[in-house]
Amino acid sequence: MSLEVNLQNLITAIGTEMKDIRASVNSPTAKAADVATALNTTATTIVGAINELLASVNGLASTDGLAEGTTNLYFTDARADARVQAAINDSGVAATDLWSAVKIGQEITGAINGVLDGAPAALDTLNELAAAINDNGNYAAGITAALALKADKTEVKTVTELGATVDTHDYVADWNAAIA
């Protein structure tokens, strides 16, 4: 019996038994023994119907017996895999295109290489860049302040402008004398 038929039979049995119990209880001549008998019969019938329903439901605990069809929503692993494979479009660029894991890996590698843009290995992570600037969040401001302290080109004087003489001492002679 199908699950639907079992449920219909259960509802019919419960309804019939409840109608009998109500008639017995509402009857002015009903006796306690009649009501007890009706209740025992109903309980036996309901328990039997529930047990039959339970056996039917337990039979559906596995999908192994279900046939794969065109109108049901049951798919085997092979059918699901085939649909996913058919949907993969590695050459697509739309947001709705489905890429394979290989294509996704290639795109991630390409994006990382684009960000690194040939940076040396010692400076190709954010941590290495932070270490290179001494983990200073205000590095740019510090460099700008230091550059502001440098001498302007109009303030730099040549040796001649300072009136000094260039040392013409022969240090090579000193070296040669020292090693002789």
Image (cartoon, helix red, strand yellow):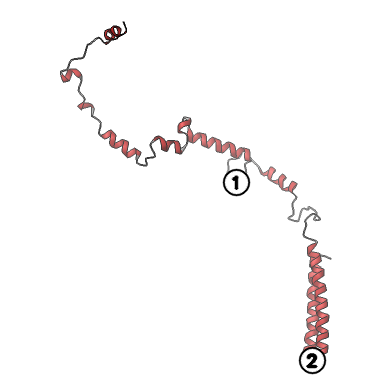
Label annotation for residue 27: 2
| The C terminus, quarter of image | top left
Mark closest to the chain's N terminus, 1 or 2: 2
Check the image and name the residue furthest to the left: 163
- The residue that disc 1 covers is 96
Residue 40 position within the rendered picture, expressed as x and y whole percent measured from the top left: 82, 81
Q: How many numbered circles are shown?
A: 2
Q: Amino acid at mark 2?
A: Ser
Q: Residue at x 20, y 23 (%)?
A: 157
**Residue 161 vertical position relative to residue 53 in the rendered view, above or below:** above
Q: Residue 26 at what x, y percent from top left?
A: 77, 90
Give the image quarter of residue 45: bottom right
* Disc number lying in front (1 or 2): 2
Observer-nearest of 102 and 176: 176
Q: Residue 101's spot in the image, x, y percent?
A: 63, 40
Q: Is residue 157 visible?
A: yes
Quadrant (top left, top right, bottom left, bottom right) of the N terminus: bottom right
Name the residue furthest top.
180
Residue 8 placement: quadrant: bottom right
Q: Amino acid at mark 1?
A: Thr
Residue 47 picture location, percent across and down: 80, 74
